[in-house]
Amino acid sequence: MSWDAIGAVGELLGATAVLVTLIYLAVQVRQANSAGQRESFRGYVSELNNRLLEPQRDPEFVELFQRANRDWNSISLRDQAVVSSVYSSYLFVCDEVFALRESGDLDPALQYQADQAVAAILQMPGPAVWWEHGCSFYSPSFRDHVDQLLASEDCPPPMHHTLPWYMGEADETEKLP
């Protein structure tokens, strides 16, 4: 065998090794992306619990939250600040989720879940007024996205239609069927 033939075999083996390495790295990157998306989902759920659900463990806050959800202007400015801290921190998380989705770094299913919750919340009377006054603090693309979602035929029902305790209707003894 000549040196040229040995060199050609060496080049072929080297090219094959590079190709196998690239395929291996592509598989590793895909697995890392999948793990990252799962971690993003866990992070979103954790933030949701911290921002929106955790304050609702306080019975006094629940009553205030229900009044705010029914009629934003019926509560004092101090109470508006308290409830706004919950609404705004939750919506900032959703704005971040939207930005991740726009950059391609998030599973569309997670964005769908966030969209459903945001639309359901912002259709209640109190949060609708709050959004009207506070939406300027969010990114323009997120605001446009939310406005389009709220105007969509596929918009979910308001939160209190499916989870009536969000507004705490007059008869507090009433239970879900």
Image (cartoon, rainbow, N blue to C red):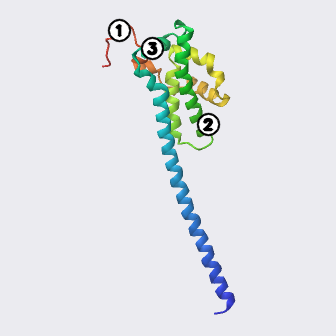
Q: Residues within 10 Å of mark 3 (few under 14, many from 20)?
A: many
Q: Amino acid at mark 1?
A: Asp
Identify the residue under disc 1: 171
Upstream in sequence: badge 2 or badge 3: 3
Q: Amino acid at mark 3?
A: Gln
The answer to whether any part of residue 162 appears in the image is no
Mark drawn on residue 99: 2
Q: Is residue 95 above or below residue 12?
A: above
Query: Where residue 175 sits: x, y (%)?
Result: 31, 16
Residue at the spot x=59%, y=64% of the render? 22
Query: Where residue 118 sits: x, y (%)?
Result: 52, 26
Q: Residues within 10 Å of mark 2 (few under 14, many from 20)?
A: some
Mark drawn on residue 66: 3
Upstream in sequence: badge 3 or badge 1: 3
Q: Residue 134 lies in what quarter of the image?
A: top right
Q: Tag 1, which secondary structure?
A: loop
Upstream in sequence: badge 1 or badge 2: 2
Q: Residue 24 lies in what quarter of the image?
A: bottom right
Q: Nearer the viewer, mark 3 or mark 1?
A: 3
Distance, label 2 to label 3, CA atoms, is: 30 Å
The N terminus lies in quadrant: bottom right
Residue at the spot x=52%, y=14% of the render? 126
